[in-house]
């Protein structure tokens, strides 16, 4: 439809990356030298700040943003509901609970593959519980799903808060981390776990995406033309849980991005799920990187909670786009 | 042939259909008639394999319906619902192509587009169509599946006289080619010459 839009998104993404590299709590005099010569020891101070703090943090923002953008597409597609997002259908809270329980049981360490596995199980269980509780006699009813999802998320988030209060370990993270999210504690080590998890989740989303197009006709019609709605939804929820668990176990819960990114991408490129997965991932990555750069520089050296910035950036964009193009998703 | 034997269907504790039997023959148009709420759509859903039966059995070509996989069933019968909902703004041609990619053949696809006068709609968004136009798209999706059996729930309800006549003519052509057509209609029409077999459900 609007093919040139992807170039604008990539341009925004590159510009945001360049800005994110050059700004921060401390000014780097030799940014370009240390960027282009990572192994040179001429400017050790600048080199350490850039390669051990800034670059891992930017890479984490891009990966988490892409994960949440893809996760939003899976949540909306699986529920056939424009308001579904990981923070509403229970995936985020469930993933956080899974990780916290794993930490409490002393089975896993934060940022490890084990923690992400706990998050995947928690997120999958919570989202399947939401969908099961919201099931009415007909297909998934839009309003029921959202109400049940908000209630399920709130219940599990409360359990996360109580459980967190019971852990006295330093690496267990705070309640505010699990509720609002933060990239301040990420290290380069996290990336080696996060990157393959995000690639796996996006691949799963890419694989199931064409069947989500057909699921949008409703469960009965999908079945009539030969698509198993139950199996399709289960695969989409697994991809959703992998993406959300990767994001949540690394940076905590960041609400709103999973809702906004797919809508912004859909308005530009149409509703087909397969291209949407990639476009939404690019949009999510760009928004989260811009938000995180703002979060760490606006009030430097203090950090603002990232969730506040994503809402501040994403919400007006979403409202503007949806008001101008109201016909893109019709709710029955 | 589809044999439905001694069907009983419950919704909760409410009996929707009790001990009902019907045969659907290839090459014939079977009309299921009756007043609102007498279980016509429920009967169609049970023949489509969408419902659990409290008792009784549906056999399609001497094989129990329960033994069909979802994919096999999609090559055996096509269904158009009374009101097909489209939530995403796909274009009409995209919707038809997606349905065609699942099952169906290109010849039936182009015949369905011609018979239902869908050509003027092809580039429009399905979400912007009127109810009658959306229903015609849904009927075209079902016809494009090119299955031996075709089930249509209230296909004329939202159509004007001209498209009603056109749909009836195409259903007759399909039946003449051997398709077993089942049509649910809620009004007792003055003329029922378009159908071969009439199945009347009495009000509950």
Image (cartoon, coloured by chain):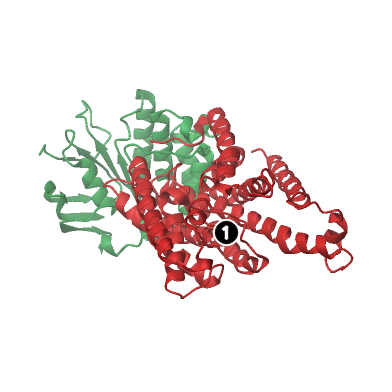
Residue A252: x and y in percent read 52, 57
Write down the residue under mark 1: A202
Q: Is residue B25 visible?
A: no
A143 vs A132: above or below: above
Chain holding disc 1: A
Residue A323: x and y in percent read 53, 29
Residue extending farthest to the bottom is A107
Residue A63: x and y in percent read 63, 57
Q: Is residue A125 visible?
A: yes
At 53% from the left and 59% from the top, the residue drawn is A243
Query: Quadrant of the image for the C terminus of chain B?
Result: top left
Q: Secondary structure at mark 1?
A: helix
Left or right: where B175 falls relative to A330: left
At 37% from the left and 58% from the top, the residue drawn is A159
Judge by depth and name the residue closer to the eye, B83 or B101.
B83
Residue A12, quarter of the rendered image: top right
Judge by depth and name the residue closer to the eye, A297 or B181.
A297
Query: Quadrant of the image for the N terminus of chain B?
Result: bottom left
Q: Drawn colour of chain A?
A: red
Judge by depth and name the residue closer to the eye, A303 or A231.
A303
Chain letter for the green colouring in the rendering:
B
Left or right: where B51 falls relative to B85: left
Q: Dot 1: within a 10 Å radius of its alpha carbon, few (fewer than 14), some, or many (20 or more) residues?
A: many
At 39% from the left and 38% from the top, the residue drawn is B85
């Amino acid at each position: 439809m609007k093919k040139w839009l992807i170039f604008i998104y990539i341009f925004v993404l590159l510009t945001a990356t360049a800005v994110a590299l050059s700004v921060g709590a401390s000014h780097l005099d030799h940014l370009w030298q240390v960027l282009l010569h990572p192994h040179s020891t001429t400017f050790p101070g600048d080199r350490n700040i850039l390669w051990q703090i800034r670059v891992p943090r930017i890479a984490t923002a891009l990966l988490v943003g892409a994960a949440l953008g893809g996760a939003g597409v899976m949540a909306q597609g699986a529920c056939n509901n424009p308001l579904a997002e990981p923070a509403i259908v229970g995936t985020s809270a469930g993933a956080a609970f899974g990780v916290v329980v794993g930490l409490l049981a002393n089975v896993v360490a934060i940022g490890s593959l084990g923690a992400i596995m706990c998050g995947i199980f928690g997120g999958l269980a919570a989202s399947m519980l939401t969908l099961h509780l919201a099931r009415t006699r007909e297909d998934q009813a839009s309003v029921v799903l959202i109400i049940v999802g908000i209630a399920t998320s709130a219940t599990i988030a409360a359990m996360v808060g109580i459980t967190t209060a019971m852990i006295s370990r330093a690496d267990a993270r705070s309640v505010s981390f699990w509720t609002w999210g933060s990239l301040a504690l990420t290290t380069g080590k996290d990336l080696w776990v996060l990157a393959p998890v995000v690639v796996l989740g996006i691949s799963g989303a890419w694989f199931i995406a064409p069947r989500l197009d057909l699921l949008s006709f409703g469960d009965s019609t999908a079945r009539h033309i030969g698509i198993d709605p139950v199996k399709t939804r289960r695969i989409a929820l697994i991809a959703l849980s992998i993406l959300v668990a990767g994001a949540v176990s690394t940076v905590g819960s960041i609400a709103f991005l999973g809702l906004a990114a797919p809508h912004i991408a859909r308005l530009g490129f149409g509703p087909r799920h397969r291209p949407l997965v990639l476009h939404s991932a690019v949009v999510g990555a760009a928004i989260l990187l811009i938000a995180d750069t703002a979060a760490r520089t606006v009030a430097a050296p203090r950090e603002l909670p990232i969730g506040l910035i994503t809402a501040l950036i994403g919400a007006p964009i979403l409202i503007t786009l949806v008001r101008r193009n109201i016909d893109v998703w019709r709710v029955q | 042939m589809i044999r439905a034997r001694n069907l009983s269907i419950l919704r909760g504790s409410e009996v929707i259909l009790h001990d009902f039997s019907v045969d659907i023959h290839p090459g014939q148009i079977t009309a299921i008639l009756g007043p609102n709420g007498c279980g016509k759509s429920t009967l169609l859903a049970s023949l489509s394999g969408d419902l659990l039966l409290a008792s009784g059995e549906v056999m399609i070509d001497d094989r129990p319906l329960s033994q069909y996989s979802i994919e096999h069933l999609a090559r055996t019968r096509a269904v158009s619902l009374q009101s097909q909902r489209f939530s995403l703004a796909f274009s009409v041609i995209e919707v038809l192509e997606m349905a065609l990619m699942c099952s169906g053949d290109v010849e039936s696809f182009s015949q369905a587009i011609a018979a239902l006068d869908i050509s003027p709609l092809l580039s429009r968004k399905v979400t912007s169509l009127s109810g009658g136009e959306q229903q015609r798209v849904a009927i075209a999706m079902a016809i494009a599946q090119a299955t031996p059996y075709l089930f249509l729930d209230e296909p004329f309800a939202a159509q004007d006289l001209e498209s009603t006549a056109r749909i009836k003519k195409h259903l007759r052509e399909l039946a003449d080619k051997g398709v077993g057509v089942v049509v649910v209609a809620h009004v007792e029409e003055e003329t029922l010459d378009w159908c071969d077999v009439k199945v009347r459900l009495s009000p509950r």
